[in-house]
Image (cartoon, helix red, strand yellow):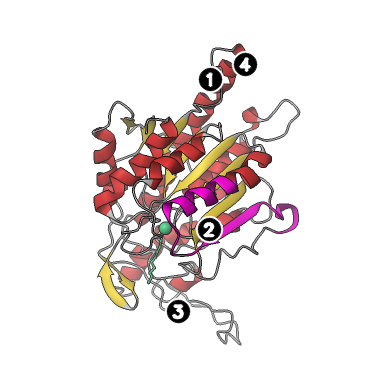
């Protein structure tokens, strides 16, 4: 399996602290996460080929899902924050415009020290000096992998048509090992360690490509399966009113981000039925998780008849995750990968959460190896 990554995913975004339960803590979305996964992949070079080749797709694919004002803000907030006297750890909102906050005269704050809440919904998405560059790089790495997905998918289809590939049991897969993650980032809000929605940008790029359209003009269909422990409010928001891509998420019930991810959130208008939320209790075991995933695949993913699968790959479902977790053990991850392989479609895995650094390589590797049918 080809793995797309970049050193910049380690070096550019490294806030020193965040807050947990009101206490100052280490920043769990740390650069060691990438290093740990990379170490696993490099020591299993029979299965994985790591490339640091990154193409620049520019601003256009990012602007397809994020608003210009938000992008300008991400790019300039840190410098302004420092000028205004903000703490060097980085930008955190002071107030957030809650819908019941009394803004009777339409008062609008004017600088990054005071208006962070305009573009941010929590205190974990700390904007440091190079955060925008880091998020930009993660999006470009993801797009580079997405472009390669098109190539391997073409080969796969040709092979199936020519009979040189005889079954859909070994679909092609690629992995974008990126940070910061993306699934909490909405069109104009950062939060939950996320700034740019890597998976959303990739899905929209696939749907937009004119050369990828079917003969009758229909765009390719993308199904996003979000297996991170947390609900991907960002990806859901981007695509809530459209039937392509499909967004499906398995996540901890009532867990962060707390206010989204109910089973009753099913999409709107043309998108009704194309957002699927499966909240699960904290007590979810290996068998229960794998069963829920298989059920989701049978009932929603297979009937959707997608051309590509994108996985928001989080392993913070792990029982020892320091900020999240079901009762899921390392044994479950190859089974999860295997369930995804059985969909039979070209698949792009994009890294989201997972904070037990010690077992991160093993758990992510387990999913990818399961997809390859190696375990
Ligand atoms: C990102 B991803 C709770 C602090 C909130 C943010 C968690 C973001 C998870 N006291 N921390 O989905 O893995
Ligand atoms: Zn998560």
Mark closer to the observer (4, 2): 4
Mark closer to the observer (2, 1): 1
Mark closer to the observer (1, 4): 4
Q: Is residue 274 left or right of residue 91?
A: right
Mark closer to the observer (1, 3): 1
Sequence-wise, the earlier of marks 3 and 4 is: 3
Sequence-wise, the earlier of marks 1 and 3 is: 3
Secondary structure, mark 1, is helix
Residue with the mark numbered 3 = 95
- Distance in Å between CA atoms under marks 2 and 1: 32 Å
Q: Quadrant of residue 356?
A: bottom left
Which stretch did the figure color magenta?
268-296
Name the residue rendered at 62%, 62% in the picture.
263
Residue with the mark numbered 4 = 161
Sequence-wise, the earlier of marks 2 and 3 is: 3
Q: Is residue 230 left or right of residue 221?
A: left
For the residues bearing labels 4 and 2, Cβ distance under 8 angstroms: no
Name the residue rendered at 29%, 77% in the picture.
23
Q: Looking at the image, which residue sits at the far front?
A: 287
Residue with the mark numbered 1 = 155
Sequence-wise, the earlier of marks 1 and 4 is: 1
Secondary structure, mark 3, is loop
Q: Quadrant of the C terminus?
A: top left
């Amino acid at each position: 399996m080809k793995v797309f990554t970049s050193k910049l995913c380690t070096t550019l975004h490294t806030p020193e602290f965040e807050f947990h339960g009101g206490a100052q803590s280490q920043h769990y979305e740390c650069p060691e996460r990438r290093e740990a996964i990379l170490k696993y992949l490099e020591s299993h070079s029979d299965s994985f080929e790591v490339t640091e080749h990154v193409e620049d797709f520019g601003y256009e694919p990012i602007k397809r899902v994020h608003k210009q004002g938000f992008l300008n803000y991400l790019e300039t907030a840190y410098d302004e924050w420092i000028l205004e006297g903000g703490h060097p750890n980085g930008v955190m909102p002071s107030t957030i415009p809650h819908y019941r906050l009394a803004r009777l005269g339409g008062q609008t704050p004017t600088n990054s020290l005071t208006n962070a809440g305009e573009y941010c919904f929590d205190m974990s998405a700390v904007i440091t000096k190079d955060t925008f560059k880091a998020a930009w790089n993660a999006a470009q790495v993801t797009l580079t992998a997405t472009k390669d997905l098109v190539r391997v998918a073409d080969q796969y289809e040709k092979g199936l048509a020519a009979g040189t590939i005889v079954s859909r049991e070994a679909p092609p897969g690629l992995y974008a090992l990126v940070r910061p993650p993306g699934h909490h980032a909405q069109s104009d809000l950062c939060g939950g360690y996320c700034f740019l929605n890597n998976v959303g940008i990739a899905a929209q790029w696939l749907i937009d490509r004119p050369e990828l359209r079917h003969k009758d003009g229909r765009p390719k269909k993308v199904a996003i399966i979000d297996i991170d422990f947390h609900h991907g409010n960002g990806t859901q928001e981007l695509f809530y009113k459209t039937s392509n891509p499909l967004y499906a998420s398995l996540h901890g019930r009532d867990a962060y981000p707390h206010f989204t991810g109910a089973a009753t959130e099913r999409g709107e208008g043309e998108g009704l039925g194309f957002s699927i939320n499966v909240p699960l209790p904290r007590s979810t075991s290996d068998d229960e998780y794998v069963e829920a995933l298989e059920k989701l695949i049978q009932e929603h993913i297979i009937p959707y008849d997608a051309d590509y699968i994108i996985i928001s790959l989080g392993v913070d479902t792990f029982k020892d995750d320091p900020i999240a977790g079901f009762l899921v053990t390392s044994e479950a991850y190859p089974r999860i990968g295997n369930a995804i392989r059985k969909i039979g479609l070209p698949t792009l895995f994009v890294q989201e959460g997972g904070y037990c650094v010690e077992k991160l390589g093993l758990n992510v590797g387990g999913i990818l190896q399961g997809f390859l049918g190696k375990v």
